[in-house]
Image: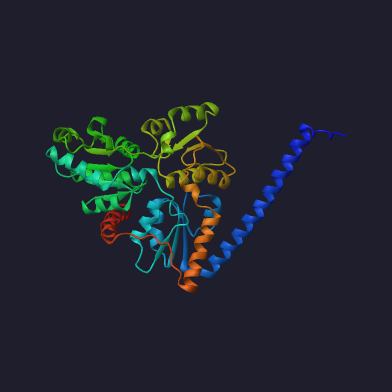
Amino acid sequence: MTAKPETTGESAAGAHESAERNAQVDAKIDAGIDARIAELKQKLARKLAIAAHHYQDPAIVSFADLVGDSYRLAVEAARTDAEYIVLCGVGFMAESVAVLARSDQTVLMPVPQAGCPMAGMITPAQAREVERAVAAGGSASPAPVVYMNSTTALKAFAGEKGGSVCTSGNAEKIVRAYLDEGRRVFFAPDRNLGTNIARSLGIPEQDTCTVGAQDLDGSNRARLKDLVPANAKIIFWDGFCPVHRQFTPADVWQARERNPDTRVLVHPECSSEVAKAADKAGSTEMLLREIAEAPDGAVLAIGTESGFVDRMIAAWPGKNISHLRKLRCSDMALTDRNSLLQTLEAIVRHEETGAPLNRIEIPANDRENARKALSTMVAFTEK
């Protein structure tokens, strides 16, 4: 007798039961990993500090001793008494902590290959080409203001040239300080952040210019001389965040069409068009503060990395928080429970047997100059 074929309803029910079983298995595995992480944290105690960026998965954030933006992670993580600092984020963040850390501290990343595309969009050699372009026009060297989302080598260039590192939260203050000293500013690598700062400072577009890798050709001296106009107060490097660049003014308009009461908050790595269309643009810490201070029932559309927005939705159920558009940073998503657990297990092995650790190492010369630029940022920010 031929078997009766399974009905569509039965197939759907079976698939649903299978999905539920798999979810239960995954939950048990995650619970086991979580228990082991908690055990190792307790074992290492004050020797360990886990620092997580706002964009990390909630499971990672739940184990963090410090959660913050790139500024807070760099400055406060290095101020801890911990011997081992585990940075859950991307490469430039761990490097910045390593630059500021004491010689007796070890900085590690669960996923060392987690990078930042923007950080790779300019090299120190290209920054020196821009400096030469300014000199070719007869002007003094500009003050480099280098976004935290950059390599240690570029931060070292800034320190060598008397410049500063900045974050999205303090960039405006730092740029203003150099302009008030009568210096021109070379802002790299994020053009969008630089453009939004210039607009906030009231600097006309005609008093700025943008330079990118495509413009640099040292063999053409005439072109190099004309690359940076004499009136340009701020010179932007043409870099960008691949996530924030995807937000559009149409996203803002559509959010308001869905609900006219919507307040749109965006990160300043978005384009100036998006920042102008939004109700407010600011750093991740500013977004966090605005969300926390909004009254229950507030309607908020947040234009930044989706991991942060998901956490805000879970943390504030009494507020109507939504994604302006759901965009995940693939590099931030690389750190998971397993990679964090493996890092803690490696530390314990090192403690017990002396096994080597895959620590973040910074060349001595880069460390010295990058520390200068980071220290300048701290001085500007905290005074």
Quarter of the image where one finds residue 239:
top left
Residue furthest front as drawn: 1
Tell which of 192 and 256 is nearer to you. Answer: 192
Q: In this rendering, would 132 be left or right of 278?
A: left
Question: Which residue is pictured at 14% across the width and 41% down the height?
Answer: 135
The quadrant of the picture occupied by the C terminus is bottom left
| 301 over 40 or under it: above or below | above
Q: In this rendering, would 184 be left or right of 24?
A: left
Q: In this rendering, would 135 be left or right of 296?
A: left
The quadrant of the picture occupied by the N terminus is top right
- Residue 155 at x, y = what percent? 29, 51
- Residue 250 at x, y = what percent? 46, 27
The answer, for residue 45, to whether it is visible in the render is no
| 266 over 47 or under it: above or below | above
Count numbered badges in the picture: 0
Question: Which residue is pictured at 50% across the width and 47% down the height?
Answer: 333
Tell which of 377 and 201 is nearer to you. Answer: 377
Tell which of 216 and 183 is nearer to you. Answer: 216
- Residue 100 at x, y = what percent? 34, 60
The answer, for residue 288, to whether it is visible in the render is yes
Q: In this rendering, would 80 be left or right of 152?
A: right
Residue furthest left as drawn: 138
Question: Which residue is pictured at 71% across the width and 45% down the height?
Answer: 20
- Residue 373 at x, y = what percent? 27, 54
